[in-house]
Image (cartoon, helix red, strand yellow):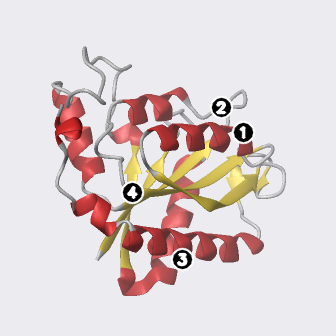
Amino acid sequence: MIRIGVIVGSTRPGRNGHRVAQWVRDLAAEHAGDAADFELIDLADHALPLLDEAVPAARAPGRQRHTRRWAERIGSYDAYVIVTPEYNTAPPAALTNAIDYLHQEWGGKPVAYVGYGIFGAVMAVQKLRAQAGVLRMADIGPQVALSLREDFVNFTEFRPRELHTAEVHGLVDELLAWAQALGPLRTAPRTAHQNA
């Protein structure tokens, strides 16, 4: 069974991210049925400090205990849905920091995005897409853009419009197709260059 991690990209007190991610997870699980297992990954539960590894993840696995725990968690999934707000046209620092901790664990896996903000976090997602390419992730096209004006009451209480249900279903269908297609990349032996 394909395992998909739904990443809550905000750690801010009073955040909306957990409610949005839970909604995505529930819709996705219902739509996919037995084809996939969807699990929430809350960055707040991992309490990663600002990147504190002496060697970049592209060169060597991290040595800190929190890095090894994070790598084990992320490495266990076949694909991801990143749920992100947008702060000053960018994703939260906690999210980019968490991504930067790892390298090999992300590669060969598809990633999809659900953004929420005044303009649906489209600029934050654009920056995450660029980061995904460097990490050899398959950045799929469908994106769910939730508006703080139209999908939240008073900018805080999450009440998504019905049209987003079909968008999540389409995102899940494409994510599963890519996860299946990329299976050989995830199971292929590592090359000498990757082991360096």
Looking at the image, tell me whether mark 2 or mark 1 is earlier in sequence order.
Answer: 2
Residue at x 80% of width, y 45% of height: 119
Label 2 belongs to which residue?
90
Find the distance from the CA under tag 4 to the CA under tag 3: 15 Å
Q: Give the quadrant of residue 164.
A: bottom right
Q: Looking at numbered disc 3 in the image, what kind of residue is underneath it?
A: Asp
User: Which mark identifies residue 123?
Assistant: 1
Find the distance from the CA under tag 4 to the CA under tag 2: 23 Å
Residue at x 50% of width, y 61% of height: 22
Marks 3 and 1 close (CB-CB < 8 Å)? no
Q: Which residue is more in the foreground, 86 or 158? A: 86
Find the distance from the CA under tag 1 to the CA under tag 4: 22 Å
Classify mark 4: helix, strand or loop: loop
Q: Is residue 90 visible?
A: yes
Percent from the top left, x then y, of residue 5?
Answer: 39, 58
Label 3 belongs to which residue?
173
Question: In the picture, which quadrant includes the C terminus?
Answer: top left
Find the distance from the CA under tag 2 to the CA under tag 1: 6 Å
Q: Nearer the viewer, mark 4 or mark 3?
A: 4
Label 4 belongs to which residue?
109
Drawn side of residue 81 relative to residue 79, left or right: right
Looking at the image, tell me whether mark 2 or mark 3 is earlier in sequence order.
Answer: 2
Q: Nearer the viewer, mark 2 or mark 3?
A: 3
Residue at x 17% of width, y 55% of height: 189
